[in-house]
Image (cartoon, rainbow, N blue to C red):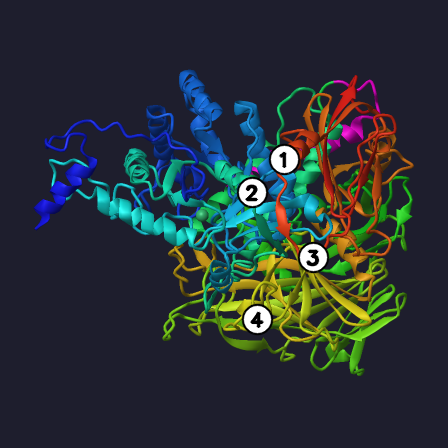
Amino acid sequence: MAFPLLFLLFCTFCSSPSAIYSTFIPYNTSASVVSGKINVHFVPHSHDDVGWLKTVDQYYFGGNNSIRGACVQNVLDSVMSSLFEDKNRKFIYVEMAFFQRWWRQQSSGMKERVKGLVNSGQLEFINGGMCMHDEATPHYIDLIDQTTLGHKFIKDEFGQIPRVGWQIDPFGHSAVQAYLLGAEFGFDSLFFARIDYQDRAKRLQDKTLEVVWRGSQSLGSTSQIFTGIFPRHYDPPDGFTFEINDVSPPIQDDVLLFDYNVQERVSDFVAAALAQANVTRTNHIMWLMGTDFRYQYANSWYRQMDKFIHYVNQDGRVNVLYSTPSMYTDAKHAANEEWPLKTGDFFPYADHQNAYWTGYFTSRPAFKGFVRTMSGYYLAARQLEFFRGRSGVASKLGVLADALAIAQHHDAVSGTQRQHVAADYALRISIGYKEAEKLVASSLGFLTESRSSTRQGSISTELEQCPLLNISYCPPTESISSDEQSLVVVAYNPLGWKREEVIRIPVSSENVEVRDSNGIQIESQLVPLLNATSRVRTIYAKAYTGHFPSEMPKYWLAFSASLPPLGFNTYFVSVANQTGSSSILSLVHTAENTKARTVEVGPGNLKLRFSVDSGELTHFINGRSLVATSVEQSYGYYTGNDGTNKDPQASGAYVFRPNGTFTVKNLGQVPSTFLRGPLLDEVHQQLNPWISQVTRVYKGKEHAEIEFVIGPIPLDDGTGKEITTQIKTTMKTNKTFYTDSNGRDFIKRVRDQRTDWDLEVNQPVAGNYYPVNLGIYVEDDTTELSVLVDRSVGGSSLVDGQIELMLHRRMLHDDMRGVGEVLNEIVCVLDECEGLTIVGKMFLRVDQLGEGAKWRRTVGQEIYSPVLVAFTKQDASKWMESHVNSFSGVDPSYSLPNNVAVITLQELKVGEVLLRLAHLYEIGEDKDYSGMARVELKMLFPNKKIGKVTELSLSANQKRSELEKRRLVWKVAAKEEESKVVRGGAVDPDNLVVELAPMEIRTFFLNFDSPQIYVS
Ligand SMILES: [Zn+2]
């Protein structure tokens, strides 16, 4: 039966119909776009996770293949061979962390040939960051930094500027990705796969998978980007996958062999193309030829694509070509179509009615905290490296920069990797930290010593830092003895404005005093260290340092430091030798020995009232702003679904699927303890055996700082748990709350609603969770309630007037999204293992309506950039005489405006600096600060002569003016006319003032004439 058909096929495809022979077939792969036909753009790609089931290095060299046969080295080796074979073939590469590993080991001859591929457009770098970053849990500064690093590599080695954003795998998409990490990089388009299944269904129907996305309300159309969402996922249509072990039928076109199938496969191809064209505007559709870790034997793909291009184009019903996302974008642009407008973002992401990927907003909270802490530290370290001057020496921050860059990967800071991979990321960051710590110490040492201009040779001052200060472990401060030596505390402020901050250090003696840099004694307070923290201190100090810490210090010594912009001040802690001069000991009492029903704390304007019976916060009262409102704070947890019911979806590393809600009842077994003093009051609460917290109210601050210790989360009842805190008020918030996008713009959320479609609510809790990086707030007619966080977490407002944050998770089941491991973090010290305990902070404040933004933006920046403290011991008066005690990198009369932050200050080489300035407010966010801000560069660099100022794109790989010239203009179907968007003007070379409009970030390359080492 098959024979006549075969014969028919011979006639169609053989050059000589009368003969049956097999010979070389010169496939014609040279197709380009054909107008009037459906064009299928083949985009060959490999999605290479920079760590997930295996570490980044294991994926690269093919180690640990029993977990998964994946070797990126194979991908790159074999792709290059295939590209050399046929100049029409194309490939895109995305992850520079892998490409750099490969590039380092190539011969110069190979490098030349690969440069040829890049120059001809056969090999194109897209996205081009070190990794394909997550979009929910990283901070925008980290995202800029990680992309800058990758783009610099591409520019330096290949002279290329990536044109396309390629975020194909991240689990939901942020507004900041669209406007900041897309349009502001100069990308012409952005592509991805994962959006909510309900949203996708509607977009397939409406043909609105491709849109113009305006991610920023403030920057509007000046920062919009053409965005394509794939109809299904980032793999080819069914039946067109060609890795060696794949089951799709290859084209068999050798007439002497059985199973000849050219016509059949061509028809399959045309059918799949027409189906996709049906849901896509214009005649252009993209086929993603590849998926995770494909092209390890590239020819198995290219052989088939060559044949499809040859035979399908012979058939002629549709046209298919080797392409790239840039070529596809140009084709879309040339079609001159009007595109639907998208605003807001694509969170949360659900791939199924009970599968909301909102658990990973909180997964691995300790790692998320570590990444955030190191991010702020890296920013400060670059500043200090600049102030010291590298003098041509290579930067000591490269290891930390690399480690932080790959930690932004969508299976890194997201918390969705295997345990050994999480450990690998953390190890890389801590190695980077060690290098950075030395640099910070030597820079601060240099700056404190630079008073003597005749100083020569090495720096003699050895300053120590205490990365475990958060668990009260700090050897240099714990041992202030009665000899001549004082503890010298150098406190550095990485912000561009002045700052008052209470510094707390652990001390063992109660007979200490604090002096400022003029030798004048200042007020200080001793706060007893209570037992709740001692366990964490012992276990985690051992886990980090390898040895058990010395005996627990008795007190936190607190004093208020007054710090200049981008500068430091010095304080001296010594044994008090006169009676009455010693630090003030806090008054301590417990709720047990009071008769009152309520206790009020707070030495300044802010008072918090606590109920003696429940032990809980009840009221927030600000004597200055006249806010007085009831606020309750409590803890609870969800038990995770175990996946055994009829819809088998468990809660896991990605997915949050609660199965029950429980309140943590403070049974009053451990009564609250109140500590009071002149600088701060504290309320210590043990909520249950594994949750405790300290609420602090500082004299000079109008917010409450809540430090929580959570863990080990018990699993002995057989259920995984996701621990939350709730802050409740009586505010009428009408289902509405606001969460930030990567720490930048705030986006309006309405419970049980989406802006782009009518939401069918299946998961009323998980489906209302959003990522929180900076903070979350609610407001009503009179008041705003805001909570800021010290790391990324998931959050929501599940009832009016309430805010909920998920702080920790420990699970018993995998959620079947590929990681194949249960999220159950364990810490082992010696032979003892237990679940992870976390220590973190949140910050709470109630404002009159319209006043909250000022606090969120200023304190938000202070949380990101905490005061950096370093210590040494020396005779205080000798130090004061011989050292620089106070330093500011900016002119003494100057400080940055309150709405601007320096987010990058980095010496690239001698006399060349990269500077990024960020406006911190959105349009209309604050009555005073949402206007144009101005920064005077001459005042910012008082001891330098600024030669040339060049404005660059956000990733610093091209001139801003060239980016604007190249930018594609898209027609948008907008319902309303946009009001005029404001941006800062060009920088005048004489007055050197930088204007910043709301939400604008401007990046500059500065040349200094006759660079000089700073002398105070
Ligand atoms: Zn991935």
Discs 4/1, front: 1
- Neighbourhood count class around disc 3 (C-alpha, 10 Å): few under 14, some 14–19, many 20 upward: many
Q: Which residue is mark 1?
A: 436
Disc 1 and disc 3: Cα gap in Å?
Answer: 32 Å
- Neighbourhood count class around disc 2 (C-alpha, 10 Å): few under 14, some 14–19, many 20 upward: many
Q: Earlier in the sequence, mark 4 or mark 1?
A: 1
Rendered image quadrant of residue 275: bottom left
Is 977 or 375 nearer to us in this picture?
Answer: 977
Q: Earlier in the sequence, mark 3 or mark 4?
A: 4
- Neighbourhood count class around disc 1 (C-alpha, 10 Å): few under 14, some 14–19, many 20 upward: many
Q: In the rendered view, tell whether residue 103 sits above or below residue 609.
A: above
Q: Earlier in the sequence, mark 2 or mark 4?
A: 2
What range of the chain is rendered magenta? 428-456
Discs 3/4, front: 3
Give the percent coordinates (x, y) of residue 937. Answer: 83, 32
Disc 2 and disc 4: Cα gap in Å?
Answer: 51 Å
